[in-house]
Image (cartoon, grey):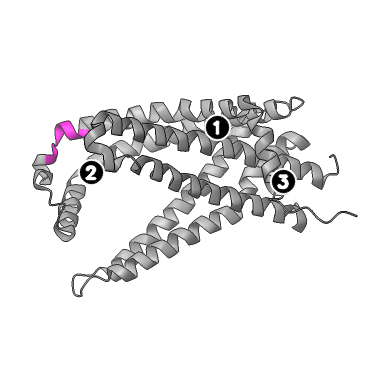
Amino acid sequence: MSAPQRGTQTLVGLMSWVFARPSLTAIEVAWRWSFGLPLLLACWIEAHKILGELRPSAVGLSNFDAQNPWVAAGQLSNACAIYQPRVAAVLLWLLPAAAVAWVIASGIGRGLVMRRMEPSLRLRPFAMMALQAAWLAGFAALCFCWLRSVQWAAATHITPKAEPDLVGLSIWVIFLSLGFFTAWALTSWALSVAPLLMLLEGRSALSALGESLRLGRAMTGKLVEINMVMGIVKLALLVLAMVLAAAPLPFSDQLGPEAMRGAWAVATIFYLVASDYFQVVRLKGFQEFWKLHHGTC
């Protein structure tokens, strides 16, 4: 008998399989960008409106002191307090609209990716949207808890009656960020694999969500492992994109601002496309482990 297969042992094979089928990544990129580009445009328009009504010079940012971090922090804090009501008014309608748009785009787009991956599957867009809404709710809850924990760290390490403890604050922010990242990687697989279970096993959305928590220790271990690895890969891609964006900086005087903006754009596009590619790799991994779990390979 062969030894049990670890979740990441077939990662290179999965990457090769997805790379040989660029249409899968193209669909993933298409649905994500069809949501992201209009959202960025809306944010750009609303930001211009706010800055047009209240210019940076009117809130003290024209004399921004980048050489003194404490002065700069105070200037940014005062400016944020002034801009906050206007930004909050925009977010009041923009966030719900963006959430609904993402649920629709991801429900249709992710279903098309799965259908392309397994042509025998039947598209169920509304059920997919329900499961994508559950994933988004979980992610929003995680972001809220992270933000509240960082606010707690700031409130306990920067007080008006004592010298700010910047080292302690930095340690807590790094610890909390890595902790929440790990927690999400260890738990989000259940929300990510539920759409696959729904389509492969013909379940309802609620039944698939419940079944994702009852897959057994062996299957769960593989899903957690590949989810963790994909999370680490995304961090590595982010670091690589930052390196690519910073590489031309020593030659900025010779290259000029336009070339620098082009380099930053290329680094950003590289990260986004590579991230979408690994999303498809993770989805393919989930599918293969489901087949192994049910003995269909």
Whether residue 132 is in magenta: the answer is no
| Element marked by disc 3 | loop
Tell me what residue is drawn at x 10 percent, y 43 percent. 62
- Magenta stretch secondary structure, dominant: helix
Q: Quadrant of the C terminus?
A: top right
Q: Which mark, by number, is residue 148?
A: none
- In the shown orientation, is residue 60 left or right of residue 274? left
- In the shown orientation, is residue 237 left or right of residue 147? right
Q: Amino acid at mark 1?
A: Ser
Q: Mark 1 to mark 3: distance in Å?
A: 26 Å
Tell me what residue is drawn at x 47 percent, y 47 percent. 140
Percent across and percent down for residue 290 are 76, 43
Tag 3 residue: 10
Q: Mark 2 to mark 1: distance in Å?
A: 31 Å
Percent across and percent down for residue 230 are 58, 47
- In the shown orientation, is residue 148 left or right of residue 277? left
Tell me what residue is drawn at x 74 percent, y 54 percent. 6
**Which residues are drawn in magenta?**
50-56
2 or 1: mark nearer the eye = 1
| 1 and 3 marks in contact (CB < 8 Å) | no
State the residue lying farthest toward the right: 1
Label 2 vs 1, first from the N-terminus: 2
Tag 1 residue: 106
Tell me what residue is drawn at x 21 percent, y 48 percent. 80
Percent across and percent down for residue 121 are 74, 28
Q: Amino acid at mark 2?
A: Pro
Residue 252 seen anywhere in this rendered image of the structure: yes
1 or 3: mark nearer the eye = 3
Name the one closer to the observer, 212 or 127.
Answer: 212
Mark 3 surroundings: few (<14), some (14-19) or many (≥20) residues within 10 A? some
Label 1 vs 3, first from the N-terminus: 3
